[in-house]
Amino acid sequence: MNTKFFSMLMLWRVLLYVTLLIGAAFFLAPLYVMVVTSLKDADEIRQHSLVSLPGGLNFDAWRLAWDSACTGAQCSGLEPFFWNSVWMTIPAVLISTTWGALNGYVLSLWKFRGSETLFAFLLFGVFMPFQVVLLPMSQVLGWMGMSSSIAGLILVHLLAGLPSTTLFFRNYYAAVPKDLLNAARMDGAGFWMIFLRIIVPMSTPIVMVTLIWQFTQIWNDFLFGVAFSGADSKPITVGLNNLANTTSSVKAYNVDMAAALIAGLPTMLVYVVAGRYFVRGLTAGAVKG
Amino acid sequence: MSSALKINGIRKCFGKGDNTVEVLKRIDIDVASGEFLILVGPSGCGKSTLLNIIAGLEEPTEGSISIGDRNVVGVPPAQRDIAMVFQSYALYPTMSVAENIGFALEIRKVPKAERQARIAEVAAMLQIEHLLDRRPSQLSGGQRQRVAMGRALARNPQLFLFDEPLSNLDAKLRVEMRAEIKRLHQLSGITSVYVTHDQVEAMTLGSRIAVMKGGVLQQLGTPDDIYNRPANTYVATFIGSPTMNLIEGRASGVEQFTIAGAQLALAAPSNASKPTLLGLRPEHIRLSDAAAWRGIVNLVEPTGADTYVVVDTAAGKVTVRAAPQTQVRPGDAVGLEIQAEHITWFDQASGLRL
């Protein structure tokens, strides 16, 4: 009876692990194919199967993808697009996170008449499909003289991200005890002093969550990038699209794969470096003194 | 003595129009310099709102608050020369104990050397010198409480406010910290206002007690006044544990008071027509076989130092404090002997003391 029970238990365990492994393999397979393909040359790709290992570590495709593959008429690889993305993403992430923290601080801890209504309107921004703002936004950028520029893209991403960053910080700060604020007020601290000396130092987890979230959103964005960028301000997602769509006699799968990996690496890197904060920040609600 | 805090006709309403709730209905209290005033009452009585108004965290709808000679209505909390200890301690989680204590001084731009001297002095007073480098999350409840008091003490304010500071501690620590607060008050001599719902804290700490209920000040007096001369039945039953016995009856002749099931030889200070309540604390009734007023023992509660005996009488349940070795059992018939000089009489209709 007892042994039968345990063997049943073992059977379930094995089934569970097999299922999980199949699931993991299913999701990792494309990544595997991408990595091995990017390390092969054209002959290898043609002669061997999709999943076979490359003959050696051949980084030619990566070099091509980085600085000499053609994206339309221009043949300088992804490098210029990569730096466009960097100069677009870093300011947009930093400003939208800082601004969101400030918004959340006010909406949670310095409530004023109408602040809840304002927050409700902000929430619309979180769920609004961005397609509906494309035309008006393009008009506004034109008026401001920021069309087809990195600065314009930064502004668009800043505005598009603000509802989410505000929501994150507002909910995190909702758990800050009211007494903490009162104690600081009695100690003589004002709005900015409380924010900078008390609230910001206890915000590390939610700052991490917001940074990762915003970085991923902005780096991976294609819609705004394709709609609002000019010839020399296209982000890497647009560059990748152009690279993959530029037709030549033979499709260079290895270069396409390397380019896709280059485009995806920064977000993966950010998640690996700050990922543990991401999980911790999502689960840590209460701030206990 | 001059008055250190003057609460003058304070009213506070929340909401507007038909939904207005009046949580404080004209409160007047004068606190002398060096006094320890307790605001006590059940939750929702308005005591914390009153404290917040004194602190400046809320503004009164009507009335004025003076600290020292200065009317402080409209003055921000930081400029009232007050310090407050919160129920949740409200320590700054990312600062060390020393930084917590010194924060207010830092904001007031006190030079660093002077600040550190003050922190050391306060830490010595509270015996927390060894904790100065720790974060609040590394402290026990009692230690956090001490740091919260240190933060208030560091500024050497004109007025100390306490908002139920002991209610998050376990029973043993609460008694310890209660004594500590009393010691610190005697040491510093700073005028204090202390909000609590615990009547033992009120009795042990207060030089005067303000009993509140429903936004109305029920009685303001010394612990002795409140305990022995309660102004009404509410104060009589709120303060004291077990609570005061209130027995209905009416005067029925010269030196005669009739209650359900017994005639007592007592002179009630009311005329025969008026229903009257006879108030007696458990310690002022004795179990005695000879007494005329009789009942059946319902419950025996030994607490160690005393044994409380609940007796069913025709006039209702009566609690008696008896000697710890008292040998009575539920179901025993007993007599109740009243110590007439300790009776407090109340008018039954109004609840006021006669």
Image (cartoon, grey):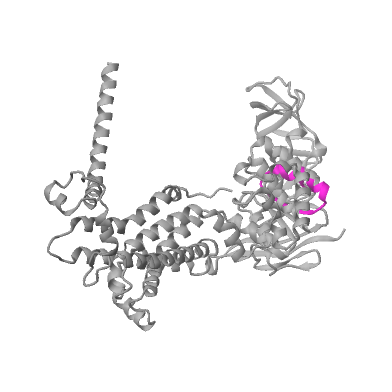
Can you say which quadrant of the picture contains the N terminus of chain B?
bottom right
Write the residue at 24% across / 64% down. A69
Instruction: Using the image as rendered, state which of residue B328 and residue B111 is in the foreground.
Output: B111
The part of the image, by quadrant, that contains residue B312 is top right
Q: Is residue B251 magenta?
A: no
Instruction: Using the image as rendered, state which of residue A278 and residue B353 is in the foreground.
Output: A278
Q: Is residue A17 above or below residue B167?
A: above
Write the residue at 68% across / 67% down. B76
Instruction: Using the image as rendered, state which of residue B40 and residue A76 is in the foreground.
Output: A76
For the question of whether residue A146 can be seen, the reply is yes
x, y percent for residue A100: 46, 64
Q: Is residue B211 above or below residue A19?
A: below
For the question of whether residue B245 can be seen, the reply is no
x, y percent for residue A130: 30, 68
- Magenta residue span: B184-206
Instruction: Using the image as rendered, state which of residue B354 and residue B175 is in the foreground.
Output: B175
Instruction: Determine whether, in the image, residue B228 is placed left or right of residue B99.
Output: right
Write the residue at 35% across / 62% down. A219
Number of residue marks: 0
x, y percent for residue B291: 76, 27
Instruction: Determine whether, in the image, residue B299 is placed left or right of residue A48.
Output: right
Q: Is residue B205 magenta?
A: yes
The furthest residue to the right: B1
Q: Is residue A81 above or below residue A60?
A: below
